[in-house]
Image (spheres, rainbow, N blue to C red):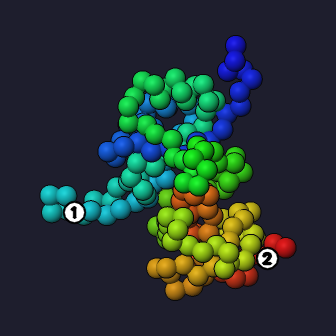
Amino acid sequence: MEADKETEVWYAMRATYRRELDAMHLFEKERLGCFVPMQYKVSIRKGKKVRALVPVIHNLLFVHARPSELKRVKSQVTYLQYITDTRSGQKIIVPDKDMQRFIAVSGTYNDHLLYFQPDELNLSKGTKVRVTGGEFEGQEGIFLKVKGARDRRVVIQIQGVIAVAMATIHPDLIEVIK
């Protein structure tokens, strides 16, 4: 069978009309890996403050699957689309290492994380660093000034899709990577 030769990769995908959670449940049912970046938001419902976990960016999800498995599931639902690189037109496939870093940070649901579209940050202005202690110990990213934060933050980017800036990290816990 062909699927055995295929390796599982992370695809960046869109689920139209805010159906990213429906898609996540579908992939879980199919036993395929899926990650939707989420954060807590406070909203008012019936006059009461409610804190709920919601998607950071509507329609965005990442799927960990073999190409043939994903094609099979995708053929069953109309609302799933691959995110493609605007320059090459190729499907965006995220390296495992980048995805693991991104999940390790955004999966904490830390209230101080900031999310950005790729064109909102100029990562070439930052410095490549590694976090040496605290909640994000071992993570690597780009240390730079980001909009909405007083101090510089360590940013992890999924090329062409999304970037997350970590909570403020004390400078003593950051080392520059050459």
Instruction: Find residue 107 and report its horizontal and vertical position in percent.
Output: 55, 54
Q: Quadrant of residue 11?
A: top right
Which corner quadrant holds the C terminus?
bottom right
Kindly identify the amino acid type of the residue bearing the numbered disc 1. Ile
Q: Which residue is mark 1?
A: 44
Residue lying at the far left of the rendered structure? 46
Residue drawn at x 40%, y 60% as measured from the top left: 40
Which corner quadrant holds the N terminus?
top right
Compared to residue 109, the image places residue 3 above or below, namely above
Residue lying at the far right of the rendered structure? 178
Q: Earlier in the sequence, mark 1 or mark 2?
A: 1
C-alpha separation, residue under disc 1 versus residue under disc 2: 43 Å
Instruction: Find residue 47 and report its horizontal and vertical position in percent.
Output: 15, 63
Q: Does residue 93 appear in the picture of this structure?
A: yes
Q: Which residue is mark 2?
A: 176
Residue drawn at x 69%, y 48% as measured from the top left: 95
Crowding around mark 2 (Cα neighbors within 10 Å: few <14, some 14 to 19, many 20+) is few
| Residue 115: mark | none
Instruction: Find residue 42 and report its horizontal and vertical position in percent.
Output: 31, 64
Instruction: Find residue 117 and report its horizontal and vertical position in percent.
Output: 49, 64
Q: Are marks 1 and 2 in contact (CB under 8 Å)?
A: no
Which one is nearer the viewer's eye here, 63 or 137? 63
Compared to residue 98, the image places residue 131 above or below, namely below
Query: Judging from the image, what secondary structure is the residue with disc 2 in?
Result: strand
Looking at the rendered image, the disc whose residue lies closer to the viewer, 1 or 2, is 2
